[in-house]
Image: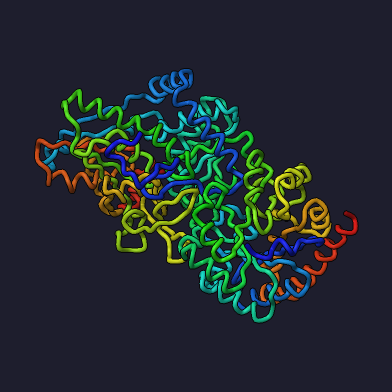
Amino acid sequence: MKTLNEPSNQTKRTGRYGKDFGGQYIPETLMTELEKVEKTFNEIKTDETYQAELHDLLVNYANRPSLLYYAKNMTEDLGGAKIYLKREDLNHTGAHKINNVIGQALMAKRMGKKRLIAETGAGQHGVATATIAALLGMQCEIFMGKEDTDRQKLNVYRMELLGAKVHPVTTGSMVLKDAVNATLQEWASRSEDTFYVMGSAVGPYPFPAMVKYFQSVISKESKEQLAAKENTLPDMVVACVGGGSNAIGSFANYIDDPSVKLVGVEAAGKGVDTDRTAATIERGTTGIFHGMKSLFLQNDDGQINPVYSISAGLDYPGVGPEHAALAEMHRAQYVGITDDEAVEAFEYIARQEGIVAAIESCHAVAYVQKIAPTMSKDQIIVCTLSGRGDKDVASIAKYKGVDIDE
Amino acid sequence: MSNLTKIFENHKAFIPFVVADDPDFDTTVANIVALANNGADIVEVGIPFSDPVADGPVIQAGDLRAFAAGVSTKTVFQIVEQARKQTDVPIVFLTYLNIVFKYGYKAFCQKCQSLNISGLVIPDLPYESKAEIMPAANQYGIDIIPLITPTSGHRIEKIAKAATGFIYVVSSMGITGERDAFFDGLKDLVAEIKKYTDVPTAIGFGVHTPEQAQEMATIADGVIVGSAIVDIVAKEKQQAPAKIAAFTKSMRTAVDRSEVKA
């Protein structure tokens, strides 16, 4: 039955977001496997055994719930809205990525798969996948752009330490998008025993929906935690956006609360108006790539542009289809933060709060630094710290011209 | 619907592939003509894409050479326009969907019709998503060539029943590129397809020797050869057309031999 507020001219299609984002655009070789993933995803939502195992690992292995921390020093220093930090950096493996990886790895196990493959940018998703593969006794192979294996050596070694094989990808611009290409190719070559653990809220349906489902634990918790502390909803939720997994998880439980402003922070690189950027929503146009219709940085012919950000986790030429739809509907706002601003925030939050946050997350922190002073003291911002910054210390030092011996 | 199906009537088809603008405009035109004049039934012209996820290293390298030559969608159309002055061989484009989407489905199909392009092979357009291009394709008589793979299983029926032009049967798992072994159930796969349609089948992915071409043409109605030709272009550059002519002749002979045997 139609409800009154449901627009009659828009039929809801499976796997589509907004007018026409999302969908399934992937080689036929993978379609049968994708159908199996979709079937499993639909089953696990109501399967008690699965849910119990997921809950157990999230609580007893991943260290959930993560803290919702009142950043008193930042709040006082910025002199505006009250700032709460959702501390995904305190999760096991040091980032939000573990939430999704546990969920997908348990799906893989249920499907009888023995081998996990994944792409990674900064290495956090690769580390999380390697971790869960070790825990569940599965094989693991990670595809990572050569550019990224060079700037995130520590994470490469961590993955190897955990028993994973890391393949440096030397095609294209040798970053995250190329790692996704390589992982899709590997999956097309071998899917019988292999599950592709997609790290971001991108790709063909059901991946964007799955990643949102597993990451929405972030906003489920933050909503309850803030209600307990302040007995109210936040006025604004801020999270960084590459493909958009931590942002969609941070937004998920607030999307239907119109009073909560949702802000996704993209990596502007050297600036939104330059070619050295990864600000997909601000600069992108609609296209079809990596299995989905969404917004992409591309030329007039539909060739995907090389992108750039100091952050290996955010330099992706596309964005998850639900973010494209949230932007289209003006439900969420997307802003760009440059390398310089993010690096400044990296130092700021370290000195103010004693937290070394991931350079990805520092894009969100930098936006909070800008917006909080313009808000009143009775307003509340929840900012997700998607990961910890240990992995970035060496490259930030280099950026600042400090020579340290790794 | 195009005239593609007719080509396969009482005749095994040889369908070679070249990347447009690899290594340059004039060589591609000459390559298309060499293929057409030496026994190709249909020429598959690849539109280079920045991120060809279904393609192996050989075709990826061909795409990179084309980008180095400054290829654009417009250049690809101009190449076909030039080739059309010398040959009326049926041509299909191999393209990733984003190229067509950005040009506009309608405008792209209209342009194809004007160049006498018969069909489009779009590796990242599965059955579920083709509804968005079909109105334009139907309006301008362009076949959207479906792919069926060793993993298609229960999907074969719906894909085959909706097929027009020909069906691209993928020889094995994975991506394009020369290989020595194919999926061992190809015969059954083709038989399964034939249960649902009379639309001809052509096997591609990895076929690179005359012996393999003969074997594949025994199983299916035609054979598609890509990487082996792109490899010739890689090695011979501007001298490729003569080598391609010789290679095409040998493949043509092998494919014809399969008919005698069958």
Q: Give the mark count.
A: 0
Q: Quadrant of the C terminus of chain B?
A: bottom right
Q: Quadrant of the N terminus of chain B?
A: bottom right
Vertical placement of residue B4 versus A131, above or below: below
Residue lying at the far bottom in this picture: please name it. B85
- Please provide percent x and percent y for residue A376: 9, 41
Which of the two residues, A4 or B249, is positioned nearer the viewer here?
Answer: A4
Residue at (63%, 53%) from the top-left corner? B146
Residue at (23%, 47%) from the top-left corner? A367
Residue lying at the far front in this picture: please name it. A1
- Please provide percent x and percent y for residue A172: 52, 57
Left of A330 or right of it: where is A177? right
Residue at (78%, 68%) from the top-left corner? B247
Which of the two residues, A73 or B163, is positioned nearer the viewer here?
Answer: B163
**How does the figure colour the protein chain or chains?**
rainbow
The answer to which image quadrant residue A249 occupies is top left
- Please provide percent x and percent y for residue B53: 56, 53
Left of A257 or right of it: where is B217? right
